[in-house]
Image (cartoon, helix red, strand yellow):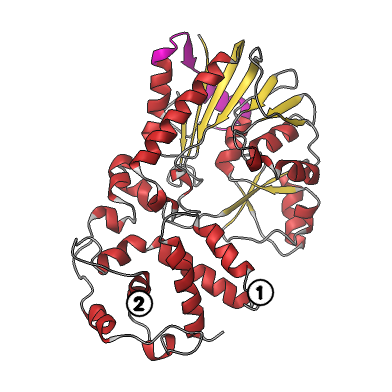
């Protein structure tokens, strides 16, 4: 593809992404899926350029004057602002499949791009209302970086997994906390990896691995992964239990679990049972709630998500979380635990949610996470707070992830 045609492809993708209705990852995949003629190098260029523009969206919008009420600006203008130092005779050549030539108005707009100093929330690439909620500039900035590729070993040691991957030309280091985790600084396509196909490794962020480990499951426990989604934690728990006992997997959206059976078969996990709903008398020793959330802790992987989230949606999510905690409470055995997790860094979904729950259920308390951590991981506890874990790119070099274990007093 000519350079101009590649940028035209980027523009067509961004026009859909910036409608803020669907995940950018899905839009990019669908665009490339329907255009088989695009070669691998061009696909990589288009994908990486699109993500880079998404990561710099706030600054580009500010440069183009989006913060001024009188300004009406297009996605094409954002792309042109991103390319302002390039040769437009080449990249906007007006060819059949390339970017259209610049209009006189666009040329004038490029000359008048803002030179004002960015407000803090723009500098940190975050919508203002979310920036103020998080109230931690360094954390917000870290969430706009690129995430590494984390995987875990499955039924083999991570030493063996690392060796097998090296033989395939894939180089990983050990994650600092999870005894199963390995990490690559670069994104890796594992679809053609033999170790992946053989079920010896699985993709999972280290923070998610830690969440599963801290569930502290035993084969005699009655366990439910209540908001299991794709089942990543259930699959790790199945391995930890060596296929003994039983893990019930449930999600309100049944379709989200479609891939769980396929993944379980590839990984050799045989002790997961998918259920559509709870019985009124079901009681569990481990009620695992990986709650639906804003996903703010995963912005490194999905930087577009911060622009799709609205205050109204966040309130709806918070209400759903509270309702799920109530369900967990009513299905908890006398000595059971609720393990509450989110991939969020927002206090409303984490500490405040727990505080509200404890106000309404004074027979419940938080487990000391330092004791649990040091017993399960045999590593020094890396946090100060002992009521819950707050992982992040700043503290643990993982996604933003919250874990709190609740039990009766």
Residue mark closest to the camera, 1 vs 2 = 1
Establish if 291 lies above or below 300: above
Residue numbers of the magenta segment: 359-379
- For the image shown, how many numbered marks are present on the structure? 2
The mark that comes first in sequence, 1 or 2, is 1
Horizontal relation, residue 294 to residue 249: left or right: left
Does residue 113 appear in this view? yes
SS type, badge 1: loop
Report the residue at 72% width, 27% height from top: 247
Residue 388 appears in the picture as rendered: no
| Quadrant in which the N terminus appears | bottom right
Residue 39 point in image, percent of width and height: 64, 78
Q: Residue at x 60, y 77 (%)?
A: 41
Indicate left or right for 319 with 188 as reference: left
Q: Callout 1 environment at 10 Å: few (<14), some (14 to 19), or many (20+)?
A: few
Q: Is residue 372 magenta?
A: yes
Q: Which residue is under mark 2?
A: 80
| 249 relative to 311 in the view: left or right | right
Q: Position of residue 399 (x, y in %)?
A: 50, 45
Mark 1 lies on residue: 36
Res. 33 image quadrant:
bottom right
Query: Is residue 167 positioned above or below 10 on the image?
Result: above
Rounded to the nearest angstrom, the CA distance separating label 1 from label 2 is: 27 Å
Few, some or many residues within 10 Å of mark 2 (<14, 14–19, 20+): many
Q: Nearer the viewer, residue 404 or 377?
A: 404
């Amino acid at each position: 593809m000519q350079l101009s045609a590649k940028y035209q492809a980027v523009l067509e993708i961004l026009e859909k992404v910036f409608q803020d209705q669907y995940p950018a990852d899905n839009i990019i995949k669908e665009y490339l899926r329907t255009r088989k003629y695009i070669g691998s190098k061009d696909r990589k260029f288009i994908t990486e350029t699109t993500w880079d523009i998404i990561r710099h969206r706030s600054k580009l919008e500010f440069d183009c004057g989006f913060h001024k009420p009188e300004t009406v600006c297009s996605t094409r203008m954002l792309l042109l602002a991103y390319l302002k130092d390039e040769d437009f005779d080449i990249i906007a050549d007006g060819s059949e499949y390339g970017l259209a030539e610049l209009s006189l108005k666009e040329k004038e707009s490029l000359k008048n791009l803002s030179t004002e100093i960015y407000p803090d929330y723009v500098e940190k690439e975050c919508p203002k209302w979310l920036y103020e909620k998080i109230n931690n500039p360094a954390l917000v900035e870290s969430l706009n970086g690129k995430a590494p590729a984390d995987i875990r070993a499955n039924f083999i040691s991570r030493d063996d997994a690392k060796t097998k991957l090296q033989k395939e030309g894939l180089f990983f280091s050990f994650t600092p906390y999870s005894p199963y985790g390995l990490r690559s600084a670069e994104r890796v396509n594992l679809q053609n990896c033999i170790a992946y196909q053989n079920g010896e490794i699985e993709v999972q962020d280290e923070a998610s691995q830690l969440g599963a480990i801290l569930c502290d499951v035993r084969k005699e426990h009655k366990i439910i992964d209540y908001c299991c989604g794709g089942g990543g934690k259930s699959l790790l728990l199945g391995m930890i239990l060596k296929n003994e006992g039983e893990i019930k997997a449930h999600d309100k959206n049944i379709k989200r679990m479609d891939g769980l059976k396929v993944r379980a078969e590839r990984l050799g996990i045989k002790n997961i049972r998918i259920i559509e709903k709870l019985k009124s008398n079901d009681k569990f020793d481990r009620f695992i709630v990986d709650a639906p959330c804003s996903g703010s802790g995963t912005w490194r992987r999905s930087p577009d998500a911060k622009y799709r989230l609205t205050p109204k949606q966040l309130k709806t999510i918070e209400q759903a979380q509270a309702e799920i905690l109530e369900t967990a409470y009513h299905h908890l055995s006398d000595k059971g635990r609720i393990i509450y997790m989110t991939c969020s860094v927002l206090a409303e979904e984490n500490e405040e949610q727990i505080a509200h729950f404890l106000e309404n259920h004074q027979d419940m308390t938080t487990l000391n996470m330092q004791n649990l951590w040091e017993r399960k991981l045999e590593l020094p506890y890396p946090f100060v707070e002992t009521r819950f874990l707050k992982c992040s790119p700043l503290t643990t070099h993982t996604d933003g992830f919250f874990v709190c274990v609740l039990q009766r007093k």
